[in-house]
Amino acid sequence: MMTHRTFIVPAAVVDMARTMCVGLAGEAGDNMFTTELSATGSDPVTHYISSGVISDEMAALLPLTTVNPDGTVTTAPGDPAYAVELAAQAGITVTVEQVAGLLAAVDVSDQEGFAALDRAGLKMVQRPI
């Protein structure tokens, strides 16, 4: 089964996030985190976003931020130990501490992309054509 998630990833950890997504999701994880973000919509790029459907197995690894009907926000933790186990099966060597740091840095929500951007105070970086 598949579920919708929006990922907002700080630029400082985007390379690790990309590697893990490709390693754990295969081709479906390729080309994630290419949309550049910042607080102003101008350089410097501070974050990246990807939004779409992912497998339930992948979703189970990740933290989940939910905006409740009353406007409060809750975050359920991810599962770094299971992510490390799956990464090892994919030939990626990472520690629980590295994955825990990555999961603590990313914002994964069930919100639509633009709603997540608004909540995070971020905008897509606009470049001249």
Image: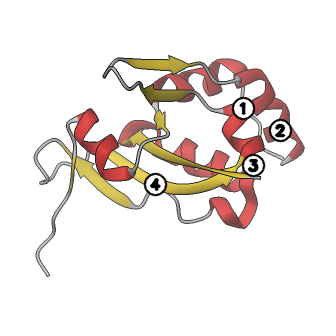
- Vertical side of 118 occupied by 105: above or below: above
Extreme residue in the right direction: 89
Residue at 64% from the left image edge and 27% from the top image edge: 99
Mark 3 → mark 2, Cα distance in angstroms? 7 Å
Q: How are the residues colored?
A: secondary structure
> Secondary structure beneath disc 3?
helix
Alpha-carbon span between mark 2 and mark 1: 10 Å
Looking at the picture, how far across and down is residue 80, in whole percent?
A: 70, 24
Q: Earlier in the sequence, mark 3 or mark 2?
A: 3
Q: Nearer the viewer, residue 61 or 10?
A: 61
Out of 77 and 31, give the one closest to the viewer: 77
Residue annotated with mark 3:
24
Q: Position of residue 47 (x, y in %)?
A: 33, 44
What residue sits right under mark 4 in the picture? 50
How packed mark 3 is, by other alpha carbons closer than 10 Å (few <14, some 14-19, many 20 or more), is many
Say which mark, if any, is on residue 38.
none
- Mark 1, other Cα within 10 Å: few <14 / some 14–19 / many ≥20: some
Tell me, yes or no, whether the two marked residues, 3 and 1, touch with CB atoms within 8 Å: no
- Label 1 is placed on what type of residue? Val
Q: Which mark is residue 86?
A: 2
Mark 2 lies on a secondary structure that is helix
Q: Nearer the viewer, mark 2 or mark 4?
A: 4
Q: Earlier in the sequence, mark 3 or mark 1?
A: 3
Name above or below for residue 110 compared with residue 80.
below
Q: Is residue 118 left or right of residue 106?
A: left
Kind of residue sitting beneath label 2: Leu
Say which residue appears at 30% left-offset and 56% top-offset: 36
